[in-house]
């Protein structure tokens, strides 16, 4: 069933046709995206510039379209292990350059300038680490600016003076929407630029744009969109850029059930970004209020684990038996399962839930990719339970 808004339904169809198939992967490096960047450079209307280089010398490029007074800046993979939005912005550019949606004004390139930095941290991407090659978290380097990548981003903000800035990230898969059992597939934030969380005109506009995107994307994610905590972080680029007067929007791509490569979040990033620039040009975001923004449920940390064993009775034969839930998460490096929590996990949901009553030691092979500390502990347990649903 199509989106009830015909224009958005058409946009979704166009986006699906524009997704680069080679970017359907769990992780992306500069070597993977470089050929796509080169292909995009051949399209009429695009401007490409090498802004500088990473700590280890990999080029950091900016792709630009349009020459209008409304300036939009988007950057991705500031954290090297967060690739979803890198695929999304390359899809978005392909859409704008080869099949611009009919909902855009014909002269949109005279009204708006879009600048995209796809992969700010190629060294971290190469190592699949959050930090850059110096071991620095670039997103906490807004004040010290000891990373070449952070200095480059700040130079771009100062030179371009964006109207709207999109800070595009991935969040870990264990965030939930409020206290529900739904993973937060998309989380938004209009970051604070002051400890007292003032709302000036630019931040109001960011919140209105987020409310619009949430409203329109809710067709596909009726319960899967959350609002990130807005505690002020002086060291963070989103907060610092908001302080320049840019309407700054954080989009965190999160998990969706049975979607290991986060392709749902990827597609919805493209649609959301496109709807945002269209709203900037037609003013439709202005009908949304602060109440609409704050009505988005909170992005709840530790709301999920990969596997949850419910009501496990643990008896080592030497002490009194006791009952606990066991939460297991995947180790980033090996993907084996490690114990994250033992105890009362009634507020945590598992992507896979197991009733301990139905598990015996002979059935542990049914647990996918069990390894490491998780295997060691589980082999020591005599598992039985009364009920998995408290």
Image: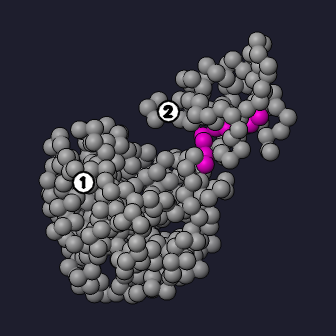
Could you say where residue 29 lies in the image, as x and y percent from the top left? 31, 45
85 with respect to 153 (left or right): right
**Numbered disc 1: secondary structure:** loop
- Alpha carbon distance from label 1 to label 2: 32 Å
In the picture, which quadrant includes the C terminus? top right
Q: Which mark is residue 143?
A: 1
Could you say where residue 55 lies in the image, as x and y percent from the top left? 18, 43
Please give the name of the residue rendered at 40% of the width and 59% of the height, measured from the top-left corner: 232
Which of the two discs, 1 and 2, labels the residue nearer the N terminus? 1
Please give the name of the residue rendered at 27% of the width and 80% of the height, measured from the top-left corner: 70
* Residue nearer the viewer, 196 or 163: 196
* Residue nearer the viewer, 283 or 86: 283
* Residue nearer the viewer, 31 or 230: 230
Q: In this orientation, does residue 29 appear? A: no
Tell whether position 153 is magenta.
Answer: no
Rendered position, 44 above or below 186: below
Of labels 1 and 2, the one closer to you = 1
Q: Main secondary structure of the magenta part?
A: strand
Q: Which mark is residue 40?
A: none
87 with respect to 16 (left or right): left
Q: Quadrant of residue 198?
A: bottom left
Q: Report the magenta residues as a range.
A: 303-311
Please give the name of the residue rendered at 43% of the width and 32% of the height, measured from the top-left corner: 333
Please give the name of the residue rendered at 55% of the width and 50% of the height, measured from the top-left corner: 301
Could you say where residue 170 lies in the image, as x and y percent from the top left? 43, 52
34 with respect to 3 (left or right): left
Find disc 2 in the rendering and name its residue.
331
Tell whether position 308 is magenta.
Answer: yes
């Amino acid at each position: 069933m199509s989106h009830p808004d015909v224009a958005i339904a058409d946009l979704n169809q166009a986006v699906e046709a524009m997704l680069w198939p080679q970017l359907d992967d769990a992780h992306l490096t500069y070597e993977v995206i470089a050929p796509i960047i080169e292909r995009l450079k051949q399209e009429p209307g695009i401007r490409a510039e090498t802004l500088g280089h990473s700590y280890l010398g990999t080029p950091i490029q900016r792709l630009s379209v349009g020459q209008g007074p409304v300036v939009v800046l988007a950057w991705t993979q500031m954290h090297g292990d967060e690739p979803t939005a890198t695929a999304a912005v390359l899809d978005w550019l392909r859409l704008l350059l080869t099949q611009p949606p009919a909902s855009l004004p014909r002269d949109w390139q005279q009204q708006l300038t879009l600048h995209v930095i796809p992969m700010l941290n190629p060294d971290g991407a190469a190592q699949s680490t959050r930090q850059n090659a110096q071991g620095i978290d670039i997103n906490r380097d807004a004040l010290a600016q000891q990373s070449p990548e952070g200095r480059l981003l700040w130079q771009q903000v100062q030179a371009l003076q964006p109207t709207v800035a999109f800070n595009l990230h991935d969040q870990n898969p264990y965030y939930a929407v409020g206290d529900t059992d739904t993973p937060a597939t998309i989380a938004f934030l209009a970051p604070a630029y002051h400890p007292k969380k003032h709302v000036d005109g630019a931040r109001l506009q960011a919140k209105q744009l987020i409310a619009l995107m949430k409203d329109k994307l809710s067709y596909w994610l009726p319960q899967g969109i959350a609002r990130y905590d807005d505690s002020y972080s002086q060291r963070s680029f989103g907060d610092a850029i908001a302080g320049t007067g840019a309407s700054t929007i954080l989009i965190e791509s999160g998990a969706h059930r049975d979607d290991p490569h986060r392709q749902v979040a990827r597609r919805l990033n493209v649609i959301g970004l496109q709807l945002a620039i269209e709203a900037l040009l037609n003013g439709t975001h202005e009908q949304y209020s602060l109440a609409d923004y704050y009505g988005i449920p909170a992005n709840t940390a530790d709301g999920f684990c990969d596997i949850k064993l419910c009501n496990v009775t643990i008896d080592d034969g030497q002490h009194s038996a006791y009952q606990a839930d066991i939460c297991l998460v995947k180790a980033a490096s090996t993907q084996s399962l490690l114990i994250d929590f033992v105890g009362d996990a009634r507020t945590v949901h598992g992507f896979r839930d197991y009733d301990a009553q139905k598990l015996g030691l002979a059935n542990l092979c049914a647990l996918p990719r069990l390894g490491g500390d998780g295997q060691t502990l589980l082999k020591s347990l005599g598992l039985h339970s009364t009920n998995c649903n408290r």
